[in-house]
Structure formats: C-alpha cells, structure tokens
Amino acid sequence: MQLSAAQLAQFDKNGYLVLRGFLDEERCDDILRVAKAHLDAKIEPIETEIGYDSRDKEYRTAVTDYSSHAKEAHITVRRLRQVYTRDIRFKTWMEDEKIRPVLQQVLNDEVVLVTAHHNSIMTKMPYYSSETKWHQDRRYWRYSDDNLVSVWLALDSETSENGVLEFIPGSHKMTFDAAQFDEKEYFSQEHAENKKIIATKVSTDLQKGDVVLFHSLLLHRANKNSTDKPKISFVYTVKGRETKAIEGTRSAQFPEIVLDILK
C-alpha cells in the first residue's frame, strides 16, 4: 500500500492521518482476545492507574523497569507494556508488511520499530479510567531529532464517550515555550495562549480496524471512559533509521528492529 500525494500532504500539514478499515476484523478480534487475557491476568509489565498522574518528568525520562510492582488486590490496568515480545499476534501486527511502505513514506527513511516507548495495549476502563491530558509524546523521549510516528490501531469502536483521541492539527510544527507546559510537561489548559490553540482541537470516531498515524510532537488527549465497556487499543512507535536514541537514556535501553521494505 502507498499513500497518495494528498494523504502525505495532509499528514505533513495536520500531523496525523486516519487510515479507515486498514486491518481486518478477524485479526483485530484475535489481538483483542489475547490482550483481554493478559489484562485479566494482569501480566507484567503493566502500568496501572495508581499514581499515574503523580509521576514526574525524571521518572518518565529515566526509569527502565516497566513492571508496576502493584501490591493492591484491585488495580485498574492502564496499559500492557512491552507487547512486541508478549505474543506472536502482537509482534506480527507491529511487523505488518502492508503498512511498512506507508511508514517509510511518512518518515522518508527506513522504518525502525521502537520498543522503548509505546509498544503497548492501551485501555480506558469503565468507571476507573482517567482523562489523558494534552501532551506531546516526544516530551520524555530522547532522540537526535523528532522523526518518530505512532501507529494507533482501534480494536473496537472509539468515540468521545469512551475516550477517542483528540488532536490539535498542526501543533507538531508549532513552537512553544516552557511556560505553556506544567511541571509534568502537560500542555496547560489555563495558559491564555493555549486556550486559543486548544479551541482548534478535532477528533474523529474510529471503528474496529481503523489506524491513526500521528507525529511525536502532535498535541493530543483523550476523555475518560464514560461507558460501561472497556476501550482497548494498540499503539506502537516507529522512527527513521537516521534518528538516533540518546545514549544513557531510557530511549536507548531497549531493542530496535529495522523493518525491511519488501519489493
């Protein structure tokens, strides 16, 4: 599959692109079934809702131990971490041959899977999930440049009611100063200039099999899940081969997988 010139221009301008019906329902259901089994069993490494908002910049930048060490009997799993090595179904999707040429186009480089960041099954659980605040993923990733793109797969329907992604188009090209972010590097909703920027936000409902590509500097957020059904999604990140992880940081502590483009 190849993106059209119009699709590439749209990604460049807005910082994201939706690919409708990219993955078939059978494969989505297969992935979802395994994800639910791991979530039910709380198989580490996981991230829980406990203490999520209290973690500081240093933790998000430096910590490499992805286990939750949760001792509570009743915990809400926010994400399954390190899914590339968990199950062949997860690995196969992250190495999907159909999407490789698309990723090469948006990166304009050879495609490399990043396992240090994202590489996750993301959840919005009913009743217990939290809102995701405006942020740039790149804020706590450490690379030589910003040529990183995330691949978000909807495993079922996603709406504003259960926490679909919202984006600020073009924010990946905007220049911000430190005062526009809080101490945890979330984009402040109280800052006067930020309010004007946030007013331009967009979202689009997703259906099972839809894929969203979005730039590592694009501002995005999501509501909490107000329905009675879990929302479960798959997200992983790729970078260009010329984009290097900074030695001594978490970004450099996990393997990278070069994906060949098949002719």
Image (cartoon, rainbow, N blue to C red):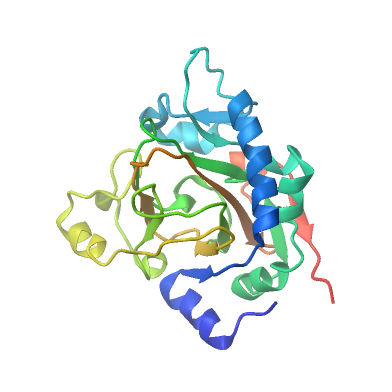
Q: Is 101 on the left-hand or right-hand side of 209?
A: right
Q: Quadrant of the C terminus?
A: bottom right
Residue at (69% x, 55% y) in the render: 26
Q: In this view of the protein, which residue sits in the foreground, 19 or 201?
A: 19
Residue 119 pos. (x, y %) = 62, 45
Residue 247 in sight in this render:
no
Q: Which image quadrant is residue 249 in?
A: top right
Position of 211 relative to 126 (above/below) = below
The residue most toward the right is 263
Q: Is residue 183 above or below residue 221?
A: above
**In the picture shown, does residue 6 fall above or below 33?**
below
Residue at 30%, 64% (x, y): give it.
201
Asked whether residue 192 appears in the rendered view, the answer is yes
Question: Measured from the top left, where is residue 85 in percent x and y?
Answer: 75, 39
Residue 216 in the figure: left or right of residue 104 = left
Residue located at (44% from left, 36% from top): 125
**Percent from the top left, x then y, of residue 103?**
65, 68
Question: Is residue 39 depicted above or below 115 in this figure?
Answer: above
- State the quadrant of the N terminus: bottom right
Q: In the rendering, at what x and y percent does residue 191 appear?
A: 18, 52
In which quadrant of the rendered view does residue 159 lie? Answer: bottom left
